[in-house]
Amino acid sequence: MAIEIEKSIVGLSKVANSDTHGEDSPYFAGWKAYDEDPFDEVHNPSGVIQMGLAENQVSFDLVEEYLEKHSEAVDCGSGISSFRENALFQDYHGLFSFRKAMANFMEKIRGGRAKFDPDRVVITAGATAANELLTFILADPGDALLVPTPYYPGFDRDLRWRTGVKIIPIHCDSSNNFQVTPQALESAYEEAKSNKIKVRGILITNPSNPLGATIQRSNLEEILDFAVQKNIHLVSDEIYSGSAFYSSEFVSIAEVLESRKYMDSERVHIVYSLSKDLGLPGFRVGTIYSYNDNVVTTARRMSSFTLISSQTQQLLASMLSDEEFTRNYIKTNRDRLRKRYEKIIDGLRGSGVECLKGNAGLFCWMNLSHLLEKSTRECELELWNSILGEVKLNISPGSSCHCSEPGWFRVCFANMSEQTLEVALTRLHNFMQKRTKKVINSSFFSFLL
Amino acid sequence: MGFESAKNNSILSKLATNEEHGENSPYFDGWKAYDNNPFHPLKNPNGVIQMGLAENQLCFDLIEEWIKKNPKASICSTEGIKSFKAIANFQDYHGLPEFRRAIAKFMEKTRGGRVTFDPDRVVMAGGATGANETIIFCLANPGDAFLVPSPYYPAFNRDLRWRTGVELIPIHCESSNNFQITPKAVKEAYDNAQKANIKVKGLILTNPSNPLGTTLDEDTLKSLLNFTNQHNIHLVCDEIYAATVFDTPQFVSIAEVLNDNETNYCNKDLVHIVYSLSKDMGLPGFRIGIVYSFNDAVVNCARKMSSFGLISTQTQHFLAAMLSDEKFVANYLAESAKRLAKRHKHFTNGLLEVGIKCLKSNAGLFCWMDLRPLLRESTFESEMSLWRVIINEVKLNVSPGSSFDCQEPGFFRVCFANMDDETVDIALSRIRRFVGVKRSGDESNAAEKKQQWKKNNLRLSFSKRMYDESVLSPLSSPIPHSPQVR
């Protein structure tokens, strides 16, 4: 039931009337198509398969198994003695046990290569809230954050909508696997300067969404050096840190700071969440970890608008302080995601489709640029529409991620069963066969002409 | 791991470095006093009793009993775990349909079924704190203003103004007519704003009132609705204390007024309700905030903004189950009102016995205590002095009227629902002693002697050291808990 936004006779705010929430973009046609005709293995085998949603459903059984074994210990409301205290607990510091468990979990994900202090963990209702909150704290309306492209489309809303802050893209391209270069950083910074816009920080996502790849250590050092040189902040959204296929391949900014003995750390802030690594997006569990005391204090105060339900904090405090569970979960989750990734890469390769070499995340970055008639956004959208309409796969076009090179698509693989993935791969395979024939035929005919 | 941060104050935003979060106000001294010396019946019987926190702790036994009987409501229990995956995965900002339905039904029940609520207009927010901020973001631009009847909930200064950049203009209410909102006062506030070239976008009120504990009568609501309608501005009613009404007059929601034939001509697009379960059900930790708007565009906008403060689906699921249990809800609402009435009566009678009057109230988790007779002079300095004596000598954390923007010194908000019966009695006995000391040994010239005693007492208790400590306001709060003046 869609309610159209009307510009009321009675004025609403400028924020309310703007479209910075991003939902009027053409990409929502994909969602609509899925909602109207959702794939179901049994009931609707020809429906649209959702490959535009970066959800992690490959390791749920581990969480369920834990809960089954520990339902008393978890004590999330069924334990009477603590219910009252828990229900009353609205302190914006958050439950200490929860903060400690999160800090521990973050350490484990980084293989113990970085330490996290529970008193620097600030709770927010999801990474969505964490990113917006940090933006409110680090920048004034009209200022800008530099963000490498391609980036998570939600940033357009999360970083800009209510904050009035701008995003200036740091353009990355396939020539070097979309890595951020010092030149690109400088170029973005200069663009801001020439428009008299004040840059307050850089926001990176590591591992990257939509690339599905970790940022290399040397690259992180370069980005940090740039932030120091320009005296700006560095926010590292590490929401996919537990989804790197090999623990050693993910380097957190925290490790870089540790190796520098925390020099210049007061400008660094890490965002984390359990929505991807643990597959619990409904629970709204986000955190800000800042090395800056003022930011921690202010963020904590601001988190009043977006705290995590104490019931959920309690549940996760129990679960994440179980050493055996977390160790096993992290390892198994990585393995399963890697296997999924290999499956989709092989399947796509067999259909003549290559992807960016990835090593993390819940998606792959697929290259269909050779299918474009012209290297334009319009052609990319046309191709996207065919894939949606004919192949019945909802994938995300690179332009929705602000990719400057047309023809790339993000394809999610962890939000479905293996069988569904196979169906998707088969459909894509058939589509590619048809397309290739078309290309061969048309070039044959053009040869004849 | 302490990091040098002083030099970097300049590289945070203006928002981050201004004082609009409100925590450096002197009122947090009460919190400090409590945190440093919290009352405990066994471990610390001489500690400070917390009477500054509007929490509802009277009916947990009912909820706990329900939980025991309904293990399925918890997704971590053996009975409920089948739903775990679906619930944990659900992040749609529309919220679980059963949750919205349950909230709409609950809102109807707390208004005696006199009005219906549409589940599709129920929008989630991070507590009423989040809901109030969200509605302002939807309705006003930075620099615009909202009128608010005073005395009002202190955190409105942060919630409605901090990140939104919107101003608050108080509508002053006076003790002479029991702090009722008069059309004259509303008009005056509005006109003053016009004169100062400030754009008023709406009026926000809390009904039942915090800190007064009173409900607005139908005529006042109608007159406010007429005013806002006439001036084409919004009307936001924070009805967070709706189910804490324990006595007549019956609660009248703005939803009922809107339904009335007499107000047919009023533009529904201007009316919005904020709700929460933090007070009515005593569940502040669960962050259940609701924006309910009669304006489709606002529902739509608030829903998008709810992405920044969604309610955990674990909690949505739990509440959907509990609040759709009609029998439980009916019993809970009746029992809660009964217990609140009893507690209120016991407390206010206890105060009356020592000559302390409270504003006649029929709702809320607190009473509005009149200590004007105890003031040295009718000034806010005197109020603050008296307050410090109450905290440090009587060892009760109460909230001074000035923190609510009350224009007359001498009023204090005292919470009574966040403790057990024994603690209430201890608090009353302390008050008795405090006032009684004044009384003893004086019948003639009582007023003069009263002044004399107070002067002496204040000199004794108000040592310079305490004064210095109470005036210091550190940048980062040393208090282990977040300050709440709700």
Image (cartoon, coloured by chain):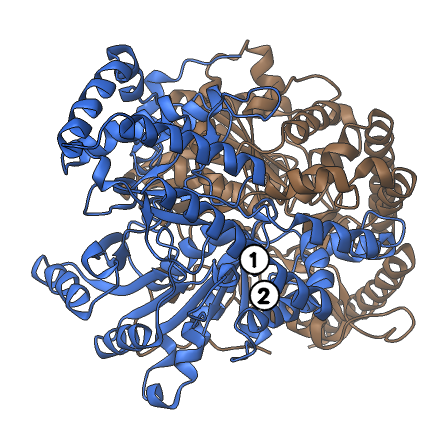
Q: Colour of chain A?
A: brown
Where's the C terminus of chain B, which quadrant? top left
Image x and y of residue A69, in percent? 92, 39
Specify the colour of chain B: blue
Q: Which residue carries the number 2 mark?
A: A27
Subunit bearing disc 2: A
**Label 2 environment density (alpha carbons within 10 Å; few <14, some 14–19, many ≥20):** some
The residue most toward the left is: B195
Residue A275 quadrant = top right
The answer as to whether the residues below labels 1 and 2 share one chain is: yes
Task: Tell me the kind of residue under disc 1.
Answer: Ser
Indicate left or right for B263 with A358 as reference: left
Name the image quarter holding residue A48.
bottom right
x, y (%) of residue A256? 59, 18
- Which residue type carries mark 2? Tyr
Q: Position of residue A58 (x, y in %)?
A: 84, 47
| Tag 1 residue | A400
